[in-house]
Image (cartoon, coloured by chain):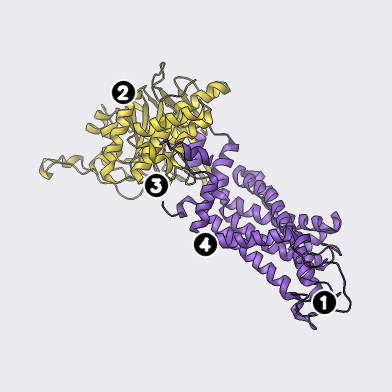
Chain colours: A yellow, B purple
């Protein structure tokens, strides 16, 4: 097969389904339930936003989606197929289909490899084509993300953060993946270049038909780029639905709190004061999560039954699910 | 490789100047490296050409001129059997350098894989290897070397092989500690996500980023190995007469220290110069191999 940086003829974006996924880490102090019973599906070609504070388990979930983190329980399906059900060759093929781009663009590049060596590495591993054709694909990928191929001679420390993130994107593009986990991909960048990088992601999605899982703590970014979003808190999904619905009519008090923490381009007298919620305190330790609803310790609406019953995961409106006793049509 | 990049000045990504040109450029920009390399080449060259360079047969005894100071006939004087010190120094170099390089090579060949495996695999493998390392490190080095040499048989090669065994845990521990850090790096995760095999992860990502302290440590060990050779030869476990080494010369001179302390100056000085040169070269290499410490252009 000749390596080229064009969409594969049979390219279809990948759909991903998570079914009751759990990732637990045993520690000396007890078990950390980083991801606890999370189910969602990501539709082919869409951008699925995952929102959460630090400690919400969003990065662990992202690593699991990229195949870097073994699950404690539950299943992940890519195009309806579980990696464990595939044979070696199929798994290898599927491996290249789902990739991850990390928050820290610098740490994701080996400091002792030139940019060109890094960008060519995925193809070196796959053994696609000869050296010259790999180099051509790498050059093409660098150009596609807006970098001159001459940058290939440099080392990571000689590049700016934005350039490094472009290199990371180029490196992933050489594999022509169908699904990319974007783990806080702009959080480490200057505000001035965040927009450019986000636009690049959007362009690549249009061009190559890539499905994204877009992980961030910044709800304004997620509502801007996502088709559908999920809100994580202490390793559990609180709410999930179309981006517009979740951001306009949030059903869960936690989502409402996140949204009201965003600065609004509205005069203060036009704002809806009744919905303004301020979060108190810190996210509880995932070593010792609250009983019942994990959010109840910080929830303005918490009642006695929130401590006793784990709220059911209910579909309150079409494709809009929430885990709260009080949400939706009573 | 050099000619290719010279003759076809393409603008592809990843073109790098050839190895020879890079080494030359490095030496030009780093006088310390150039000087220490020059010293080592001189010492090594003299040692290898010993039969032609040395003025006397190193084993020739002249019992009428024992323990003499420097003179026109004997530039560095004579030893307790009237043998020419300069000739012995030149002939001893080969044995001493061979001994030091052998010991450090053995240490690297055993220590690096052990440390890499312990740090990368982790779990029970790590526990087992680490306990082994601790056990070896808890012995006084020379005592252990004496014991191993005793078991394997007396002789320079065996002696230095056992010194290498004694050094190996130090290397392994260094590599293991760095591996534990490096294996957590995101670029290792990224490569894993591209489907890299464990061997590739180790060879391409972990080792190059974990080896730095080992380069410096092995130049230090070269110096220590020179002294270990001296100690073991002094104890009669290393070089056997009439063969000669710098360590054996010091050991011999030690017997007459109260009479003519100058006997130890020449071999002591050459060991020191060699050790310092190894060290300086190692430090320069460490910097040169680290792209982030390299100057631009």
* Nearer-N-terminus badge (1/4): 4
Q: Are marks 1 and 2 on the same chain?
A: no
Q: Are marks 4 and 2 on the same chain?
A: no
Mark 1 vs mark 2: give the one in front: 1
| Residue A319 circle label | 2
Left or right, A286 with respect to B176, comes to left
Residue B84, image quadrant? bottom right
Residue A324 location, x and y as percent? 33, 33
- The residue tagged 3 is A284
Residue A150, image quadrant? top left
Q: Are marks 2 and 3 on the same chain?
A: yes
Mark 1 vs mark 4: give the one in front: 4
Q: Residue furthest top?
A: A10
Mark 4 vs mark 2: give the one in front: 4
| Residue A206 circle label | none
Residue B27 location, x and y as percent? 53, 56
Mark 1 and mark 3 residues within 8 Å of each other at the beta carbon: no
- The residue tagged 4 is B31
Q: Chain of mark 2?
A: A
- The residue tagged 1 is B255
Q: Secondary structure at mark 2?
A: loop
Q: Secondary structure at mark 4?
A: helix
């Amino acid at each position: 097969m000749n390596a080229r940086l064009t969409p594969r003829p049979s390219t279809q974006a990948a759909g991903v389904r998570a079914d009751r996924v759990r990732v637990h880490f045993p520690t000396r102090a007890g078990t950390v339930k980083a991801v606890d019973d999370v189910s969602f599906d990501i539709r082919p070609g869409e951008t699925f936003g995952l929102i959460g504070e630090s400690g919400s388990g969003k990065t662990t979930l992202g690593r699991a989606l990229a195949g870097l983190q073994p699950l404690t329980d539950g299943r992940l399906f890519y195009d309806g197929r579980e990696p464990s059900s595939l044979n070696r060759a199929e798994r290898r093929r599927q491996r290249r289909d789902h990739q991850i781009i990390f928050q820290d663009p610098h740490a994701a590049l080996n400091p002792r490899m030139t940019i060109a060596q890094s960008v060519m590495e995925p193809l070196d591993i796959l053994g696609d084509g000869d050296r010259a054709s790999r180099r051509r694909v790498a050059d093409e990928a660098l150009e596609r993300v807006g970098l001159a191929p001459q940058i290939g001679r440099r080392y990571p420390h000689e590049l700016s953060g934005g350039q490094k993130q472009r290199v990371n994107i180029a490196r992933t593009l050489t594999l022509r993946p169908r699904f990319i986990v974007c783990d806080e991909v702009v959080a480490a960048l200057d505000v001035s270049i965040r927009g450019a990088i986000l636009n690049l992601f959007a362009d690549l999605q249009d061009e190559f038909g890539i499905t994204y899982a877009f992980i961030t703590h910044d709800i304004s970014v997620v509502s801007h780029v996502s088709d559908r979003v999920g809100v994580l808190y202490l390793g559990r999904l609180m709410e999930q639905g179309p981006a517009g619905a979740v951001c306009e009519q949030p059903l869960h008090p936690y989502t409402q709190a996140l949204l009201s923490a965003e600065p609004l381009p509205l005069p203060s007298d036009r704002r809806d004061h009744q919905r303004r919620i301020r979060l108190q305190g810190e996210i509880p330790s995932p070593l010792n999560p609250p009983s019942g609803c994990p959010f109840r310790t910080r929830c303005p609406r918490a009642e006695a039954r929130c401590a006793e019953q784990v709220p059911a995961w209910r579909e309150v409106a079409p494709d809009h699910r929430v885990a709260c006793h009080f949400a939706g049509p009573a | 490789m050099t000619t290719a990049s010279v003759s076809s000045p393409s603008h592809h990504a990843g073109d790098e100047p050839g190895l020879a040109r890079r080494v030359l450029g490095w030496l030009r920009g780093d006088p310390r490296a150039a000087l220490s390399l020059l010293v080592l080449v001189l010492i090594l060259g003299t040692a290898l050409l010993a039969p032609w360079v040395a003025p006397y047969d190193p084993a020739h005894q002249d019992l009428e001129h024992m323990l003499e100071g420097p003179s026109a006939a004997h530039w560095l004087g004579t030893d307790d059997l009237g043998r020419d010190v300069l000739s012995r120094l030149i002939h001893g170099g080969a044995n001493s350098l061979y001994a030091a390089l052998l010991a450090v090579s053995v240490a690297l060949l055993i220590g690096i894989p052990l440390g890499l495996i312990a740090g990368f695999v982790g779990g029970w493998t790590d526990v087992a290897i680490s306990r082994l390392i601790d056990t070896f490190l808890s012995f006084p080095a020379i005592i252990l070397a004496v014991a191993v040499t005793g078991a394997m048989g007396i002789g320079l090669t065996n002696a230095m092989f056992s010194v290498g065994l004694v050094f190996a845990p130090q290397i392994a521990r260094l590599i293991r500690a760095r591996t534990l850090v490096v294996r957590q790096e995101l670029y290792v995760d990224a490569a894993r996500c591209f489907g890299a095999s464990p061997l590739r992860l180790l060879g391409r990502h972990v080792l190059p980023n974990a080896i730095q302290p080992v380069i410096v440590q092995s130049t230090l060990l070269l110096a220590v190995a020179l002294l270990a050779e001296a100690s073991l030869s002094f104890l009669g476990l290393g070089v056997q007469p009439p063969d000669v080494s710098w360590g054996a010369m010091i050991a011999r001179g030690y017997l007459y220290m109260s009479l003519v302390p100058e006997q130890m100056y020449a071999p002591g000085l050459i060991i020191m110069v060699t050790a310092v040169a190894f060290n300086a070269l190692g430090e320069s290499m460490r910097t040169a191999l680290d792209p982030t410490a390299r100057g631009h252009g």
